Image (cartoon, rainbow, N blue to C red):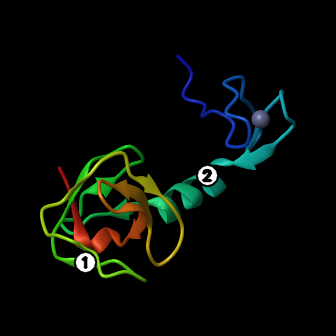
Amino acid sequence: MSDLPNCPKCQSGYTYEDGTMLVCPECGHEWTREEMAADEEARVIKDANGNVLNDGDTVSVIKDLKVKGSSSVVKVGTRVRNIRLVDGDHDIDCKIDGIGAMKLKSEFVKKV
Ligand SMILES: [Zn+2]
């Protein structure tokens, strides 16, 4: 099995190596392993305990959180399923039962 990564642009698995470059024959994207490592590092989002979070994880809220623009509060212990990691200050996109779509900060959740 090859250890070449899938194309970051189109997810093609037909990546090949050309010198120091990785090349995707399907969309023509070229990149380096260094670029890829940097990308991955930037995307690591950790919970309050330092565990790495991934898309689709279930987390639990570790403190009461006010919902912006409403009087609702997300109570400590609330389980949030199927999170989606996003860029920004609030780095978790999710939907909470009874509240709806909202964004959370990873520092206020822990992986379940
Ligand atoms: Zn590609």
Above or below — where is 2 with respect to 106? above
At label 1, the amino acid type is: Leu
Q: Give me the residue at 83% from left, 28% from top.
A: 25
Measured as percent of width and height from the top left, residue 11 is found at 67, 33
* Up-down relation of residue 39 to residue 5 (above or below): below
Q: Helix, strand, or loop for circle 2?
A: helix
Q: Nearer the viewer, residue 39 or 3?
A: 39
Give the residue at the far right of this rendering: 28
Residue pointed to by mark 1: 65
Tell me the CA gap for discs 2 and 1: 35 Å
Q: Nearer the viewer, residue 103 or 87?
A: 103
Q: Residue furthest left?
A: 77
Foreground tag (2 vs 1) = 1
The residue indicated by pointer 2 is 36
The residue shown at (39%, 55%) is 95
SS assignment at label 1: strand
